[in-house]
């Protein structure tokens, strides 16, 4: 899939190519489905990464719901909501790093690690703006370190959200808890299958991308569950 | 005599508990409904007014208020959580909606404005919506028809269906199907973990379309004059097409690309272990019917 243009795609996406090269690349893209597919992948990653930026919490309708359930009950708060919310928001840049690092860990996506590509919008917009690990400089680390750190960050973010869900499950309807847990199990199963497939074919771009997206789904669902818990506390 | 008096008293009490309030709707106002359980049905009419009808019962009060930004409807339990309340609310078609509930079904028809719906255990069924349309349910299905704009539809444990809609569309669930029919999307992100995904609509030049599933089939309807670069990815699934496709190259793993026409749109079709299928327009439903549903999928769902 690699040709002379592959490494220039992120520059193209960033609109950083000189006009003549841009024109030549566009001409090439008309005939090269492989480069077109890589460009589509890159656009998707960028879109996904932008969507994961440290956005403000979505307009929160749940507190209103919470007021209907627990207002005035006077019950003891078992959850440190401030801490939970802080961790929740912190998990987003962690997730971004996880997605990017998982993509980057793929040998098939080596263009992401190309020096020119390191200035691509996907990397520039995400990792440097919010250090994932205190004192760490992800952009200066090698791909293995990135992947390892991002993996640890992902695990920590999942653990935080799972803790919120575990501590707050008594506040949710039992059917809702069962549905959330069943769907988390469905996602976990998909993650395990993707990991097994990836173990046998670590350079597979699709498998890397699929694993990252499925892991993100888990975080999305955990985040949604944590928001439900927070709203009824 | 006693029975007559008692009946009259009950009727009077019942009348007291029924709500039928109409307030003036001013430009810029949204309808905000904060419910707990029951059904919220919203209809549109030609008047610049909001009519709220409900029968909350003795344990629950309903408050209708109006501010510069919103007409708000809230339920309040007199002792503890509110009981279920069915609302019928009539609004001007231009009025945006923010509706939320817990055990709440939501049904909307005729509104031509932004709509936000969030519920936990409830079905969401919307006909209309323009601008930002965001519909979410955890345990219920989500169905949207006739919307235009930036569309975001999510469930967790049920199906998501969009039809006769257009715009930038995101449609996701975990355990359920995602079906988009007669939809004109300029960008599309449609995905599920355990279920089928299908899109039947125009593929626009320069558009971006991503359909993905882990366990289910992914089906795309492609018109003969479509212009797209299509990338198909699978791990242990299959690829089928109802028509010849110009395969020119195969990338590492079970991943390949091909161009149709000038290849203007970017289309990504992914299924980890299901079948990726290309059909002609109008044949999406046929494929839904013809192929067996994943038994585990059905067993995992409908846990309400």
Image (cartoon, rainbow, N blue to C red):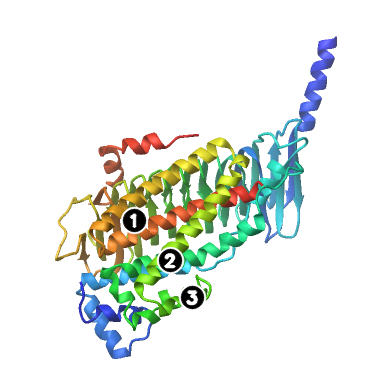
Determine which residue is flagged by label 2.
A150
Q: Check chain identity for marks 1 and 3: say if they share one.
A: no
- Subunit ID for the residue under disc 1: B
**Of residues A199 and B47, the one drawn nearer to the viewer in this rendering:** A199
Q: Residue at x 29, y 57 (%)?
A: B269
Determine which residue is flagged by label 1.
B211
Dividing the picture into quadrants, the one containing residue B210 is: bottom left
Disc on the earlier residue, 3 or 2? 3
Q: What is the number of the mark on residue A136?
A: 3
**Of residues B301 and A23, the one drawn nearer to the viewer in this rendering:** B301
Residue A59: percent from the left, percent from the top? 61, 58
Q: Check chain identity for marks 3 and 2: say if they share one.
A: yes
Q: CA distance from mark 3 to mark 2?
A: 12 Å
**Of residues A185 and B26, the one drawn nearer to the viewer in this rendering:** A185
Q: Is residue B68 visible?
A: yes
Q: Residue at x 85, y 11 (%)?
A: B2
Residue A30: percent from the left, percent from the top? 23, 75
Dividing the picture into quadrants, the one containing residue A35 is: bottom left
Residue B154: percent from the left, percent from the top? 48, 50
Mark 2 crowd level (few <14, some 14–19, many ≥20, 10 Å Cα): many
Q: Secondary structure at mark 2?
A: helix
B226 sits to left or right of A51: left
The image shows residue B206, relative to residue B2, as above or below, that is below
Callout 2 touching callout 1 (CB < 8 Å): no
A210 sits to left or right of A136: left
Q: CA distance from mark 2 to mark 1?
A: 26 Å
Give the foreground label among 2 and 1.
2
Dividing the picture into quadrants, the one containing residue B189 is: bottom left
Give the foreground label among 1 and 3.
3
A34 sits to left or right of B199: left
């Amino acid at each position: 899939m690699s040709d002379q243009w592959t490494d220039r795609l992120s520059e193209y996406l960033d609109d950083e190519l000189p006009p003549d090269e841009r024109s030549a690349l566009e001409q090439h893209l008309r005939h090269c489905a492989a480069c077109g597919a890589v460009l589509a992948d890159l656009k998707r990653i960028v879109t996904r990464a932008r969507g994961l930026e440290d956005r403000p919490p979505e307009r929160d309708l749940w507190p209103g719901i919470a007021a209907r359930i627990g207002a005035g009950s006077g019950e003891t708060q078992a959850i440190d909501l401030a801490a939970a919310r802080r961790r929740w928001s912190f998990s987003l840049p962690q997730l971004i790093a996880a997605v990017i690092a998982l993509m980057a860990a793929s040998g098939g996506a080596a263009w992401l690690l190309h020096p020119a590509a390191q200035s691509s919008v996907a990397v520039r917009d995400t990792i440097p703006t919010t250090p994932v690990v205190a004192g760490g400089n992800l952009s200066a680390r090698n791909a293995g370190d990135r992947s390892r750190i991002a993996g640890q960050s992902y695990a920590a973010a999942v653990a935080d959200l799972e803790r919120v869900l575990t501590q707050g499950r008594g506040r949710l309807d039992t059917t809702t808890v069962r549905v959330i847990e069943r769907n988390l199990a469905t996602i976990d199963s998909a993650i395990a299958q993707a990991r097994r497939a990836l173990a046998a074919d670590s350079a597979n771009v699709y498998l890397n991308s699929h694993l990252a997206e499925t892991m993100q789904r888990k975080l999305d669902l955990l985040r949604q569950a944590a928001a439900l818990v927070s709203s009824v506390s | 005599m006693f029975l007559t008096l008692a009946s009259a008293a009950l009727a009077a009490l019942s009348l007291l508990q029924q709500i039928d309030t109409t307030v003036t709707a001013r430009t810029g106002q949204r309808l905000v409904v904060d419910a707990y359980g029951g059904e919220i049905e919203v209809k549109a009419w030609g008047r610049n007014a909001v009519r709220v009808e409900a029968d909350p019962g003795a344990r629950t009060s309903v408050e209708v208020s109006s501010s510069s930004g919103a007409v708000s409807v809230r339920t309040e339990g007199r002792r503890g959580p509110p009981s279920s309340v069915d609302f019928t609310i009539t609004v001007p078609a231009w009025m945006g909606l923010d509706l939320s509930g817990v055990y709440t079904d939501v049904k909307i028809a005729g509104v031509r404005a932004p709509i936000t719906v969030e519920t936990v255990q409830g079905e969401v069924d919307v006909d209309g919506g323009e601008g930002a349309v965001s519909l979410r349910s955890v345990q219920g299905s989500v169905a949207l028809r006739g919307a235009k704009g930036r569309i975001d539809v999510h469930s967790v444990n049920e199906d998501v269906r969009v039809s006769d809609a257009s715009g930038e569309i995101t449609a996701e669930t975990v355990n359920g199907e995602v079906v988009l029919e007669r939809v004109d999307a300029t960008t599309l992100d449609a995905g599920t973990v355990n279920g089928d995904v299908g899109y039947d609509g125009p593929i626009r030049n320069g558009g971006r379309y991503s359909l993905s599933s882990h366990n289910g089939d992914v089906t795309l309807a492609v018109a003969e004059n479509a212009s797209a670069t299509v990338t198909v990815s699978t791990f242990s699934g299959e690829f089928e097409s109802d028509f010849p496709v110009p395969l020119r190259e195969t990338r590492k793993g079970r991943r390949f690309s091909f161009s149709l026409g000038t290849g203007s749109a970017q289309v990504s079709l992914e299924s980890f272990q299901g079948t990726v299928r290309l059909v002609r327009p109008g044949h999406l439903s046929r494929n839904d019917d013809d192929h067996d549903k994943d038994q585990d999928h059905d067993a995992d769902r409908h846990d309400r």
